[in-house]
Amino acid sequence: MVITIKKIDAQVADGNPDLPDMACACLVTDNGREFTIIYRSHIHGSSLSLDGEKGSLYTDSETGTVHNQVVNIGGACGLNIDDTLIEGLSPLALRGVVFAVQNKITGEITLTTEEHE
């Protein structure tokens, strides 16, 4: 498996408390498919999302898959949760995006895995 990650845009907030402290877009090629993943960092933590989509990406450690989860307030103060499997995107790709952004890597990085017999 080969995964490539390239930072394509980064924005730093100018003190506006309603904006994340930093948002960075990375172009990820994983399993032959391209994804634009947005990494947002703010005072309360960080999150990953797909460009143009609502919700947050997370890894299901039991199945080794990546999901997009959208949470909305529903009727009677309940929560409506929409959880979608993201085909072709691996947990390793998400870890690579976090690594690249947190370590301020500006060039393209390539992640490979070797299968052992």
Image: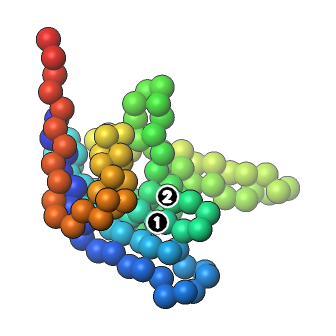
Q: Can residue 24 be seen in the rendering of this structure?
A: yes
Type of residue at label 2? Ser
Q: Quarter of the image containing the C terminus? A: top left
Q: Residue at x 44, y 59 (%)?
A: 49
Q: Position of residue 6 (x, y in %)?
A: 21, 61
| Residue indicated by mark 2 | 47
Q: Position of residue 86 (x, y in %)?
A: 38, 44
Q: Quadrant of residue 2?
A: top left
Q: Earlier in the sequence, mark 2 or mark 1?
A: 1
Q: Which mark is residue 40?
A: 1
Q: Residue at x 31, y 40 (%)?
A: 92
Q: Which mark is residue 111?
A: none
Answer with left or right where residue 81 lies relative to residue 91: right
Whether residue 104 is situated above or below residue 109 in the rendered picture: below
Q: Position of residue 33 (x, y in %)?
A: 21, 49
Secondary structure under the numbered disc 2 in the rendered image: strand
Type of residue at label 1? Arg
Pick out the residue farthest to the top. 117
Q: Quarter of the image containing the N terminus? A: top left
Coloration mode: rainbow
State if disc 1 and disc 2 touch (CB < 8 Å). yes
